[in-house]
Image (cartoon, rainbow, N blue to C red):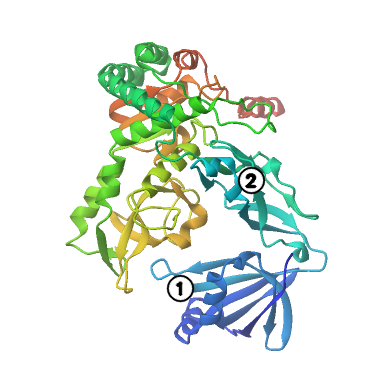
């Protein structure tokens, strides 16, 4: 459980940008203490001490006794800002903890018994889908981590939130049964996987051959969404593969179990599309180190970076959901495993140079917004050695950002949900349909996916799912009609 640590600070008499800059020039980091129905107090902390505490880990889940010139404050860090280029701390916020308070904290996950897992013994790899769990807890009961035991997991099976026994006083906030950890298969782990990959490659080739037909149908559908059923009929004969849902541990009755061969087929389809969309080519091109000066790309390196940007922005795999085996999370995890195989290193970074990424929450400080897409590159910023950086286009220019500063709002984007792809303009898309006929699969969703592409569309899934989607309308209820009626009657 939580161990209270010490940290020292001095009072900062002035607030504002000018005063904050003065503190930074003096080798200190400005901050603030707030909460517990007391007025906020501006403070400053030693730069080296604060940086060491931040990068030691678990900074945002550690309770501190903050010594402010002899006066003690029981606090917990709530946020900190890092320099977008150099990763130096710029500001830190502390929240006072009142007596009996219950607070929200993101607790890291620790995987245990992975070495005894049958799936790992057969060559599988432990993949952490969720790195932290948001919980409500008293400060004195904050655990250092939440253990996730994978000792009995086979390949393609997972641990979910409902499988975890939380310590006393710790209550998870999530309303859905999050996937925490899964065992992913190695590349070519079984003969069936190879056969499925070959079949999927043939399916992708057949779908590509039918792209002209699908594109013509899509063009017809653009003129009138009611003609989408015709689009479905036009591509019915070119749908291949068996795309199925993620295997269940039995805690959610609505989630169907599938066979290993079926899930492997789903991943093999995604892998074939990844090759078709030049994913491996992008990884090779990203071995280049790009030089940046004060956040701007060196003119000599700009053409190569722009070429990589265009290559990765050419096409995407689109999915209906995030959480199923045909969802964006599972597809991105599998393709990330393939990307890791290209690295000559023993570590397993969350992002690999040449991978596309996406912002999942607005970051007004850096000018990045939910849905913005970028790429991971090796960047030389004059810091002695190259670092991995996330590059985004801001005000027309490609600029690097520290991954650590964006980690809580950055995710892979080899595959996107149709919802997240809205606003994207791509040369080609491949839509993976779920195995089950979900209510989400509507004619409007298929229409949205098709119209993301300029030149080519491929759809992989069950024929009956596509046909059913052409007959299903999206059901929306805003309550607007009721409110208008009430307003009219009041008159």
- In this rendering, the label closer to the viewer, 1 or 2: 2
Where is residue 42, by image quadrant?
Answer: bottom right
Please indicate, yes or no, whether residue 106 appears anywhere in the rendered image.
yes
> x%, y% of residue 329?
49, 40
Residue 88 badge = 1
- Residue furthest toward the right? 100
Name above or below for residue 456 compared with residue 10.
Answer: above
Residue 397 in percent (x, y) is at 28, 57
Residue 359 to residue 153: above or below: below
Whichever of callouts 1 and 2 sits on the residue coming sooner in the sequence is: 1
Helix, strand, or loop for circle 1?
A: loop
Taking the spot 24% from the left edge, 54% from the top edge, the residue there is: 305
The location of residue 414, given as percent across then percent down, is 39, 41
Mark 1 Cα-neighbour bin, 10 Å: few <14, some 14–19, many ≥20: some
Left-right relation of 166 to 291: right
CB contact under 8 Å: marks 1 and 2: no
Please tell me which residue is depicted at 40% across the width and 71% down the height of the picture. 86
Residue on which disc 2 sits: 151
Q: Which image quarter holds the C terminus? A: top right
Near-viewer residue (114 or 203): 114
Picture coordinates of residue 230, whole percent (x, y): 38, 11
Which part of the image, by quadrant, shows the N terminus? bottom right
Left/right placement of residue 31 relative to residue 389 reads right
Quadrant assignment, res 418? top left
Dot 2: element: loop
Please tell me the numbered disc located at residue 356: none
Residue lying furthest left: 300
Disc count in the image? 2
């Amino acid at each position: 459980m939580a161990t209270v640590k010490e940290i020292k600070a001095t009072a900062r008499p002035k607030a504002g940008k000018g005063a904050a800059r003065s503190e930074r020039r003096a080798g200190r980091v400005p901050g603030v203490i707030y909460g517990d129905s007391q007025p906020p107090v501006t403070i400053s902390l030693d730069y080296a001490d604060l940086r060491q505490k931040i990068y030691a880990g678990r900074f945002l889940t550690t309770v501190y006794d903050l010594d402010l010139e002899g006066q003690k404050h029981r606090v917990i860090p709530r946020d900190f800002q890092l320099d977008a280029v150099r990763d130096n701390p710029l500001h830190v916020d502390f929240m006072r903890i009142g007596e009996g308070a219950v607070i929200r904290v993101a607790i890291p996950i620790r995987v245990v018994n992975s070495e005894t897992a049958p799936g790992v013994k057969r060559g599988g790899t432990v993949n952490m889908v969720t790195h932290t769990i948001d919980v409500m807890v008293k400060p004195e009961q904050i655990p250092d981590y939440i253990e996730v035991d994978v000792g009995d997991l086979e390949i393609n099976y997972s641990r979910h939130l409902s499988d975890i026994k939380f310590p006393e006083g710790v209550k998870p906030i999530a309303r859905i049964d999050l996937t925490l950890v899964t065992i992913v298969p190695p590349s070519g782990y079984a003969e069936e996987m190879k056969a499925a990959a070959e079949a999927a490659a043939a399916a992708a080739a057949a779908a590509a051959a039918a792209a002209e037909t699908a594109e013509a149908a899509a063009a017809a559908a653009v003129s009138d969404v009611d003609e989408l059923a015709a689009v479905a009929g036009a591509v019915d004969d070119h749908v291949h593969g068996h795309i199925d849902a993620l295997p269940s541990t039995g805690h959610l009755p609505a989630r169907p179990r599938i066979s290993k061969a079926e899930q492997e087929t789903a991943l093999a389809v995604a892998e074939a599309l990844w090759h078709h969309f030049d994913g491996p080519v992008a990884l090779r091109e990203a071995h280049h180190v790009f030089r940046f000066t004060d956040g701007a790309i060196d003119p000599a390196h700009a053409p190569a970076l722009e070429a990589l940007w265009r290559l990765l922005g050419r096409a995407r795999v689109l999915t209906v959901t995030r959480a199923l085996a045909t969802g964006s999370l599972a597809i991105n995890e599998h393709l990330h495993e393939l990307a890791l195989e290209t690295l000559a290193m023993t570590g397993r970074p969350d992002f690999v140079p040449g991978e596309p990424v996406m912002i999942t929450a607005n970051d007004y400080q850096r000018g990045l917004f939910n849905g913005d897409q970028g790429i991971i590159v090796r960047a030389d910023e004059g810091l002695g050695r190259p670092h991995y950086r996330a590059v985004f286009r801001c005000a027309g220019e490609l600029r690097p950002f520290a991954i650590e500063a964006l980690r809580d709002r950055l995710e892979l984007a080899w595959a996107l949900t149709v919802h997240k792809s809205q606003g994207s303009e791509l040369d080609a898309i491949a839509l993976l349909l779920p195995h089950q006929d979900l209510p989400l699969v509507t004619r409007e969703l298929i229409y949205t996916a098709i119209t993301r592409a300029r030149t080519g569309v491929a759809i992989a899934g069950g024929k009956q799912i596509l046909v059913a989607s052409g007959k299903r309308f999206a059901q929306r209820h805003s309550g607007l009609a009721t409110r208008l009626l009430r307003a009219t009657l009041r008159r």
